Image: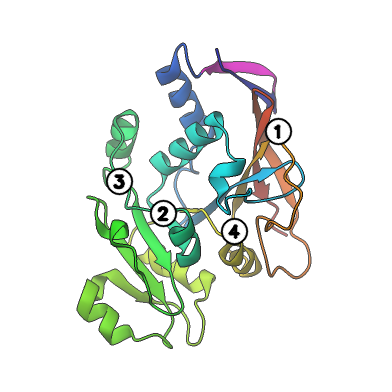
Amino acid sequence: MTQLNLLLPDARVVGDLEEGRDATVQALADLYAYPSPVPAQGWVRANVVSSLDGAATGPSGRSASVSNPTDRVVFSVMRGLADVILVGAGTARAERYRSASPKREFAERRAASDQLPAPALAVVTRSGHLPLPSLFAGPAPTCIITSASANVSALRNKFGSERVLVAGDEVVEPGLAVLQLAALGLRRILTEGGPTLLGPTVASGRLDELCLSWSPLMVAGTGPRVAHGLDGQLRLRPGHLLEADGALFGRWLVQRS
C-alpha cells in the first residue's frame, strides 16, 4: 500500500498507488493540470528531484539514484499532460532519453485538449552534437534547439528544417526557445533540466512553476544542485504539497511582480 496524501492547501488522502492506481493517477493529473486557457506565450513547468540535502543526482551521476517509485509516477503524470518536454543535451545523454510514447491513462485528456498522443521532445544543444539515435526512435516528434554558432545547415539537412530551431546567436536563449515552441502550438512546456538549462530558464523570466520532489535521503558529496547560473533570487508561492512514503512533492508557482 502506497498512500498518497495531500498536505497543502488542504489535508486529504488523494489515493493509493497500488490499490486504485488508475484513479490516483487521474487525481494527480487534476492536481497538476495546466492553466486553462494556456497563455499564448506558453506555460513553463520545471520538474526536478532532489535529495534532502539538495543533490540533484546520486552516486551514479543520474537523477534516478535520488528518485523513488512515487516520484516516477508523478514524473509520468507531468509528461502525460505536456505538449513538449524541454531538456538539455547533457541531461538527455546522461539520463539516456528517448522520444516519448503514448500512455493509455492520458489518451482521453490529450484528445480533449487537441494534443498529440504523446509529448514532443525538444533537445537544447549549443554544439548540435546529438549522438543518441533513441531521441528520434519513437512516434512522437523530436526537435533540436540550437544557436546560430552551430552548423545549422548540416543539422537541417540531416533532421529536416522543421525539426531545427535557432534560439540565440552564440548560446541558446531559453526565453527565445520557449516563444518558438509556443509559436508552434507547443504551449504546455515541461522542462526536465538539467541544472545548466534550468538556471538560464529562470534567469530569462520564463519559468512559471517549479515542481520539486524531495526524496527522503541524504547524498552528501559534490553532486549538482537542481539549477546553476542563477544570479539573485526568485520568489515562489506554494501551489500544493503531497507526501508518500516519506517523500514530498511540491508544486511552487512563480510570484510575478
Give whichever of discs 1 and 2 has the lower sequence position.
Answer: 2
Disc 1 on helix, strand or loop?
loop
Question: Which residue does the numbered mark 1 point to in the structure image?
Answer: 216
Give whichever of discs 3 and 4 has the lower sequence position.
Answer: 3
Mark 3 and 4 residues: CB-CB less than 8 Å, in contact?
no
Give whichever of discs 1 and 4 has the lower sequence position.
Answer: 4
3D distance between C-alphas at marks 3 and 4: 22 Å
Disc 3 on helix, strand or loop?
loop
Q: Amino acid at mark 1?
A: Pro
| Above or below: residue 188 compared with residue 181 | above
* Residue 196: % across, % down: 60, 67
**Horizontally, is 99 left or right of 254 in the view?**
left
Disc 4 on helix, strand or loop?
loop
Question: Which residue does the numbered mark 4 point to in the structure image?
Answer: 207
The mark lying in front, picked from 2 and 3, is: 2
3D distance between C-alphas at marks 2 and 4: 25 Å
Residue at coordinates 66% horizontally, 60% vertically from top-left? 227
Furthest toward the front, the residue is 59
| Above or below: residue 27 compared with residue 32 | above
| Above or below: residue 227 compared with residue 252 | below
* Residue 57: % across, % down: 62, 51
Would residue 10 be counted in the magenta stretch?
yes
Q: Amino acid at mark 2?
A: Arg
Question: Which residue does the numbered mark 3 point to in the structure image?
Answer: 115
Question: Which residue does the numbered mark 2 point to in the structure image?
Answer: 96
The residue stretch that appears in magenta? 9-16
Give whichever of discs 2 and 3 has the lower sequence position.
Answer: 2
Mark 2 and 4 residues: CB-CB less than 8 Å, in contact?
no
The mark lying in front, picked from 2 and 4, is: 2
40 or 178, nearer to the observer: 178
